């Protein structure tokens, strides 16, 4: 290794750059350290990989790891592997004898930026370090670009999803305008469903998906004729066919929108029965998505306690009794108690009216006791 003349530019670029030289030969470490310090680098030494990792823990981070391959205690390949997990931003450079070229190439595959063969020219070592630092800097810039790009994509996706939500909300409002008797139905079903989910211990995304599916569960009724929705008498077989197709219609409306796809099974199956006699797929028991089983109770309870074209609203006590009677046939018997238990804790927004007598109809064993 011979000395070299350093330009001001090289010295300036080396300022504040921390280098750790790892080699079991003390003489080699000292001479490399001396030459690098002349070039303006801040240099420390370690005799093996284990010592180098300890220094990383106590004194790191380092900008450059310059390591030999063959060392006692922990060799350079193992060191690179462990170092990369703890400090991926470090530029790793392997020092190797010519006979170890294959090993050096292996080190590159493990994340090293470059290698230099012994004995090496000091000018070459400086260039190798500068190139390795430049490569790491480019990697950081690329990571920043990707992170910013992902942020921008997420921002645009949120805007698009918001537009979708507003469009669907407009469709729900159009449905309620078309069917006077369903006004407020989706809001109440959402309140009931969310309260049941919370009672069952749902949190996070699972609860949020239940909430969104409940809002959208009857969207498909926009494809049902107004005369059918508001018919005061018994429906014909053809008219009833229009009604039972509404979950599938909702899925067809929402399916092209990625934002809503996770909700589709919940919406499609909210009219299945626990005993397998529901629609559209005649699913039974645990084959019905849990969110659908919850919505089935909430939807039926609100339908019974709301005035419809063909009948007046049932008293809440009668609707609660019917839910209990159908536990195990129409409804999941493990969810019915959660529905009964959660009623006293439902938070009612100002723009939503619950049925008269709602709280009074809660069975005594499920009423919230005064504190």
Image (spheres, helix red, strand yellow):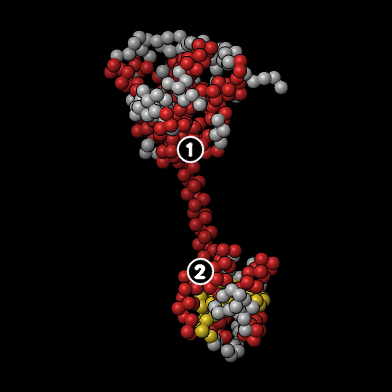
- Of the 4 image quadrants, the one containing the N terminus is bottom right
Question: Which x, y percent locates residue 100?
Answer: 48, 81
Counting labels gives 2
Neighbours of disc 1 within 10 Å: few (<14), some (14-19), many (20+)? few
Decide which of tag 1 and tag 2 comes sooner along the chain. Answer: 2
User: In the displayed structure, does residue 190 sit left or right of residue 59?
Assistant: left
On screen, residue 103 versus residue 233, left or right, reads: right
Q: Which of marks 1 and 2 is in front?
A: 2
Q: Which residue is drawn at 50% across and 26% down?
A: 334
For the point 58% across and 77% down, the residue is 67
Within the image, what quadrant is residue 199 found in?
top right
Q: In this view, does 276 lie above or below 86?
A: above
228 left or right of 100 in image: left
Question: Which residue occupies 50% across, 50% down?
Answer: 152
Where residue 275 sits: x, y (%)? 40, 24
- Using the rendered image of the protein, determine whether residue 363 is visible from the camera's viewpoint: yes
**Residue drawn at 67 percent across, 20 percent down:** 369
In the picture of the structure, the residue carrying the numbered disc 2 is 111
Which percent across, then down, holds residue 124? Answer: 53, 83
The answer to which of 56 and 233 lies nearer the viewer is 56
The residue carrying pointer 2 sits among few (fewer than 14), some (14 to 19) or many (20 or more) residues within 10 Å by Cα, namely some
Which one is nearer the viewer's eye here, 138 or 2?
2
Label 2: element kind: loop
């Amino acid at each position: 290794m011979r000395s070299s003349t350093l330009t001001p530019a090289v010295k300036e670029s080396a300022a504040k750059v921390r280098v750790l030289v790892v080699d079991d030969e003390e003489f080699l470490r000292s001479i490399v350290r001396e030459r690098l310090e002349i070039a303006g680098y801040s240099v420390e030494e370690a005799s093996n990989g284990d010592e180098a990792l300890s220094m990383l823990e106590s004194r790191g981070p380092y900008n450059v790891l310059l390591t030999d391959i063959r060392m006692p205690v922990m060799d350079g390949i193992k060191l690179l592997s462990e170092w990369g997990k703890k400090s991926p931003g470090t530029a790793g450079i392997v020092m190797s004898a010519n006979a170890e070229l294959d090993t050096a190439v292996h080190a590159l595959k493990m994340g090293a930026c470059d290698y230099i063969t012994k004995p090496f020219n000091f000018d070459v070592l400086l260039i190798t370090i500068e190139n390795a630092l430049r490569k790491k800097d480019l990697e950081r810039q690329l990571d920043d670009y990707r992170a910013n790009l992902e942020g921008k994509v997420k921002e645009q996706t949120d805007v698009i999803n918001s537009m979708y939500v507003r469009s669907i909300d407009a469709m729900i409002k159009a449905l309620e305008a078309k069917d006077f008797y369903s006004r407020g139905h989706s809001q109440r079903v959402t309140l009931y469903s969310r309260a049941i989910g919370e009672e069952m211990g749902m949190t996070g995304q699972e609860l949020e998906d239940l909430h969104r599916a409940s809002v959208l569960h009857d969207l498909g009724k926009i494809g049902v004729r107004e005369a059918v929705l508001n018919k005061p008498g018994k429906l014909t077989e053809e008219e009833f066919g229009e009604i039972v197709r509404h979950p599938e219609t909702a899925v067809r409306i929402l399916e092209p929108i990625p934002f809503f796809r996770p909700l589709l099974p919940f919406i499609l199956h909210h009219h299945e029965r626990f005993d397998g006699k529901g629609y559209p797929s005649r699913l039974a028991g645990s084959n019905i998505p849990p969110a659908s089983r919850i919505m089935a109770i909430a939807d039926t309870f609100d339908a019974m306690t709301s005035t419809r074209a063909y009948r007046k609203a049932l008293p809440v006590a009668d609707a609660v009794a019917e839910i209990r009677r159908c536990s195990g046939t129409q409804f999941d018997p493990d969810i019915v108690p959660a529905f009964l238990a959660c009623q006293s804790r439902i938070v009612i927004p100002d723009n939503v009216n619950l049925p008269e007598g709602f709280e009074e109809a809660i069975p005594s064993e499920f009423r919230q006791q005064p504190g």
